[in-house]
Amino acid sequence: MTVPGTRVGRDAEQLVVAPPEGAEEVRVPVRTVSALVVHGGVQVSSQAMALCVHHAIGVHWFTAGGRYVGGLGGSGGNVQRRLRQFEALRRPERVLSQGNQARRRSISRIIPV
């Protein structure tokens, strides 16, 4: 979304893109969206953001000049990943193994093998 004044809303399982100045709105089924990238003065409703988060679709904001402002990530997989990380860190032998791997990677960046 790059046109200032454009609004992104929600209608059921669709994102509704409403351009400014009476141009015809576009409806996009959320299952066909992989990310929502917003540039400049585009408005995204909280309902549209919630729909994106529910479907693990990232929403990213940039200034009109292209500088990254921030993003909102979907919840897909984060909880399971954190649980696996927690479980791995509870086992001392796993912690040492991970530490050794990280150290080897760091050294290989400095001294090519």
Image: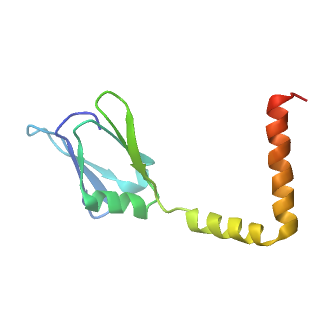
Q: How many marks?
A: 0
The relative height of residue 98 versus residue 69 in the rendered view (above or below) is: below
The residue located at (38%, 32%) in the rendering is 67
Q: What residue occupies the far left of the structure in this picture?
A: 22
Observer able to see residue 80: yes
The residue located at (27%, 62%) in the rendering is 47
Q: Nearer the viewer, residue 10 or 60?
A: 60
Q: What x and y, as percent, mark residue 70? A: 40, 45
The relative height of residue 42 versus residue 79 in the rendered view (above or below) is: above
The residue located at (29%, 53%) in the rendering is 15
The relative height of residue 1 versus residue 34 in the rendered view (above or below) is: above
Left or right, 24 with reference to 58: left
Left or right, 17 with reference to 23: right
Q: Could you tell me which quadrant the C terminus lies in?
A: top right
Left or right, 33 with reference to 5: right
Q: What x and y, as percent, mark residue 38? A: 32, 41
Q: Nearer the viewer, residue 21 or 24?
A: 21
Q: What x and y, as percent, mark residue 81? A: 64, 63
Q: Nearer the viewer, residue 62 or 11?
A: 62
The residue located at (84%, 64%) in the rendering is 94
Left or right, 29 with reference to 98: left
Q: What colouring does the structure picture have? A: rainbow
Q: What x and y, as percent, mark residue 110? A: 81, 30
Q: What residue occupies the far right of the structure in this picture?
A: 113
Q: Could you tell me which quadrant the N terminus lies in?
A: top left
Observer able to see residue 59: no
